[in-house]
Amino acid sequence: MQLYLLLPPVISFVLSFSLAILVALREFKKPAYRLFVMFLVGTGLWALIVFAFRTSPDIEHATFWIQLLTPVDVFTCLVFWHFSVVHTRLKTPRWLPFAVYSFFLISVGFALADKVIIGVTTDQYGYLPITSIIYKLLSSLYYIFIVLGMVNFIRAYRRSVSYEERNSYLYFIVGVFLSVIGGTVDYLSIISSNVPPVGLVGNILFTIFATIATLKYRLLDVNIVIRKGVAYLLTSTVIALPIVGAIVLINQIVGQGNFTIWMYLVLLLLIAIGLQAIWLKMQNFVDRLFFRERYDFLKKLENFSREVHDISDLNKLGSSLVTLIGRALQTSSVQLFMATESGDFTLIASTGKDIQEIVFQNNSPLTRWMNKNKEILFRHQIDVTPQLQSLTIRERTDLANIGAELFIPLKTNKDELAGLLIVGKKRSEQPYSGEDIRRILTVSNRVAIELENARLYARETEMRFEMQRQNEQKTEFLHHVAHELKTPLTAIISSSELITSEGLTVNPEQKERLLVNINRSAWLMDKRVGELLDLARIQIGTLELKLEPVDMVDMVHDLTSQLSALFKNKEQTIETDIPESLPTVKADKERVEEILINLLSNANKFSPARGNITIKASVMRNMVLVEIKDSAQIISDEDRERIFNAYYRGGTEADRQRISGLGLGLAITKSLIELHHGEIGVKDNEGKGNNFYFSLPIWGIGEEKQASEFSALHREGD
Amino acid sequence: MLELEKDTIFQSGDSERIWKKFCGFLDLTVDEFMDVQKGLLEEQFELAGDSPLWKKLLNGQKPKTVEEFREMAPLTDYWTHYAKYIGDKQTDWISFKPAMWIRSSGRGGKLKWVPWTKLGLERYGDFGLGGMILACADKKGDVKIQEGFHVLTLMAPSPYMTGVTGHIEESRFNIHTVPSPEVSDKLEFQARMQLGFKLALRNGMDMVGAATTALIKLAENMAASSRKVKISPSMFLHPPMLFRMIRAFIRSKREKRTLLPRDLWHVKGITSGGADASIYRERLKYYWGKVPHEMYVLTEGGGLALQSWTKENMVLYPYQSFLEFISEEDWMKNQTDPNYVPKTILMNELQAGKVYEVVLTNFYGMPLMRYRPGDLIKVLALEDKNTGIKLPQIIFFSRADGLVDLYSIVRLDERTLWQAIDNMGVKYEDWSARKEYDNDTPVLRVYLELKETAEVKKLESMLHEKLREVCPLYEEAIQEMQTNPVRIVLLEPGSSQRYYENKRSEGADLAHLKPPHTNASDKVINTLLGK
């Protein structure tokens, strides 16, 4: 008996039983695993019987063994089908497995009645069974149930959303396919004496594939396994041809038998050295042939990597990245979101859908999860990950609108999350394979640092621009200070010159007017210098507050009556809406007066004649909220952002010409409010003007906390 | 008919994903739990913040952050803050069209109606399914439940929460309640129980959901009447039923005992609720073959907590309501001075060994904010090292108005009293306890209906001893007072049944058919005494 006929059953037997023990030790409690162990035992018995049949001393023994084979075959196939049902969690009626196992009992009956194998004969490959029509019927069961098992795995493959699970099902499908080929070879060997009975090789491969798929979760992509296998087979064949040719040729020249083993070895060595270059070329050619897509992708990536080194524009870089991924993966959409200063993720570049308005906020469960885990997230994981169950309806809608399928974190070299790459579905509607994921990761890992650099560069540029702008503002401010001081100074000088000049007669009335003028100008200069000093004190942290309980009700009433003349001049009305029960605030009385005067005089200055100004106060949490609503021109969004910056003077050029000031009032006001642990801002007064609001802490609430915060602030200042 | 989105993950049958989705919250850390809670509450500001009811309660303001919300929102209760706006199922004050109005009747017997959004119901369905999975699980990740599962349900029908649960699980997960929710809704409790039992005998069942006492009663009745069980000719029309009966009969005979439910059915899990679940744990295992799994559910807030697969302490559920807690000290201060506004803390501030009152705010657009359902929980530990669960381990301690105060030293809760009464070893029908005064001396009066005869004095000293055993604080109080405060009044046989009949004729729901076990009103006691 030839070795190639005896070796497969021995290998299959040893392998099947070893794997059965391995699986049983691993997880025997689960029904699917138990069935799989039974299946492996079945294939082991199958191999054992084949071995016993082939090595039988006579036809009588061979007949005994081959009679056993049919029920074992049928049992193994039925168990495999049952396993496929349980493993893939497909729904079947509870009675169906029992009905299916009845085929096994039928096959046993027929086997015992000698109705399956009529007899045994011999051919060139050893014993050959003579089969009945019943054998053909029963062996068709082999096909039916093995194929039904495969169908189950195909159904599960289609239904599954998990890449790992789909890959595992593919292993089964490939295994079954190989087993069916093996079975067909065996079947053909029975009906035709020209075919050797080597079908067990199919079974061996089948058991290996199925066991790997059952025991391991993360498997090598089956497509890669097949492609690589075929590629190496082809390469080896092509390389083997010249070797075999050389040996045949030399044999013919030197003569068979004169060629010793060491000569073969030397020849092989020489050929190996000589063919190395060809081997590499061949390998490259086969790789290109079988991994065209990957090859092209790597080429594109290489080009892309070269290009991005020269790109410092974040938007351009992002755009190149999403285009590359979109093309490489044939996806419906790719979006690149990058982290902003606030930690939110905003859209930088996209292909496919237009989703400009979507922002992933820094406190969103999705960004929190990505920040923490920094690994690829699949869309289907979102529905089951406990931390992501709190995604809001809006966020879920956004994700659906984006058509997001994959979320890829872009990490900096400090392992911080710099950006998010969101990839939509593939155009083919197929799920992403392991190969696709590897490609995305290759790109994202390479490009993340470039993107972060570009972002930092953009930020640096912006900061440089901001500094330049501030510098210009300061220069402008110096001009302005000089002008603001020069004007009253000129008035003082000219007035005093008039008083003191000889030869010029000034009557007492004129003198009085000139002195008033000098006095007013000096006061104005004092005010401007005072503002500058205040700002300097705040900036270096030496401004001290005298905190005490301050009654805002009285203060507002006093101030409005003091300033009533100012409003009367412009025929403006001033209304107050201050509840008598308003609690006292913890504040520096003089500073709060300063704040109110500043805001009220601004309201007076910027509101038109006959305009309306309202002061409202209310309690908001632990604070008193004061609102000053004017009827001035609504401050633009751009000005609103910068109006509290020092030296900034908003409005038009005409406004700036018309209204004097250093542009420090609101900056000082803001700093004073912040020193009180309050907040200040401006918003639209329902389209009628502006609403300047500020808050101050209520006296007696959170005393200790506020005190400690306050002293901490001052220590910092010291 | 309630129409909810089918859950595709449950349909997929993928155990790993099913566990992760429905029971994965058990893997959250305290910080992650809080992140989830805060995220959902901030969404609630958007969903409910503009509703007239929220505007009314928040004086027209809309909070932006959790901190702001906790500072500006008042603590609320149903009758003061909600009854006039939603008590008659009005929709003018809420910002959504309710998918369902769910009803609850409190101790006073007054009906509370709570509107539920579709999303709220779906999330409650997820909680319920999680509970079922955990009830059937023997270890982490063990998912025995699948579509087509049959659950024998012996609870109040829709529109009570328990009945609505059946509708949701059927609609969302294709889990069949036996009898079906539609049929259940139309039947009286007895008829429902009989039909459920019959259907479970005929078609089998995978799990059972009922009040613990109902399960015990059913098992005891079965054991008592097992000798009378006969194979009737009608059983031959239903071979599975016949087979089940024969198999159960053989099993019970083989073990030389009476017929028990576990002989008839191999239930995979039992879900139950109530303070008695832990007391009857072993007895239920004996009768039904499984220990019960407890869930803490409220009509006003849905699923708040549930036990893990160990069926021991409960773990708070993050996805249904925003949870705040009032410490026992603050709660007591508020009990004595109703004007005192107690402070609340969050889950990450809970301390082991302390008792807290629960305060909840609905998610998913539903209306209740900082609502006090009047329940007390006790935190036993801050995590469970055995299971690796990093969330606080709690038990339902008592109704806030259900503690019996003795000498201001010890407050006996229903569970403790029940345990002590059960430990006496006498067969009893039901009981009710409250503090009363005998000549200005406070006593613990227990109204007890026995199934056997016993001497009152002996019972009083027995209960006293058992209370000393189960409650260290009681022991402390006794040491101080040097007296036995237990006074037992034996009720006439049938008193509990009479109360039950009275209540049923008044239309009370299942949860309130029995007399309250603690602090019952004079009216209840008089009914029990037949006055």
Image (cartoon, coloured by chain):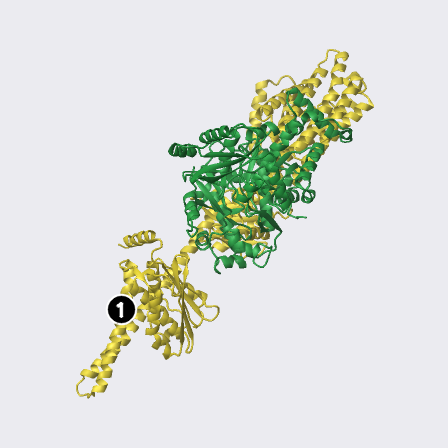
Residue A620 in sight in this render:
yes
Please state if B135 lies on the left or on the right of A39 as rendered. Answer: left
Residue at (69% x, 39% y) in the render: B191
Q: Name the residue tied to disc 1.
A: A529
- Residue extending farthest to the right is A133
Seen in the image, is A677 located left or right of residue B309? left
Name the residue located 38 percent from the left edge and 34 percent from the top edge. B480
Image coords of residue A489 (percent x, y): 25, 75
Q: At numbered mark 1, what does the secondary structure look like: helix, strand or loop? A: helix
Q: Residue farthest to the top? A: A57
- Give the amino acid type for the residue marked by disc 1 in the picture: Val
User: How many residues crowd mark 1 within 10 Å: few (<14), some (14–19), many (20+)?
Assistant: some
Tell me if residue A192 can be seen: no
Vertical comparison of A79 with A708: above or below: above
Residue A453 image position (x, y, % from top left): 44, 50
Foreground residue, B493 or B36?
B493
Chain A representation colour: yellow
Q: Position of residue B342 (x, y in %)?
A: 42, 49
Q: What is the total number of numbered labels drawn onto the structure image?
A: 1
B258 left or right, relative to B518: right
Q: Which chain does green denote in the image?
A: B
Position of the N terminus of chain A, as image quadrant, is top right
Residue B476 to residue A474: above or below: above
Instruction: Point out the residue furthest to the left here.
Output: A502
| Side (left or right) of B499 relative to B480 | right
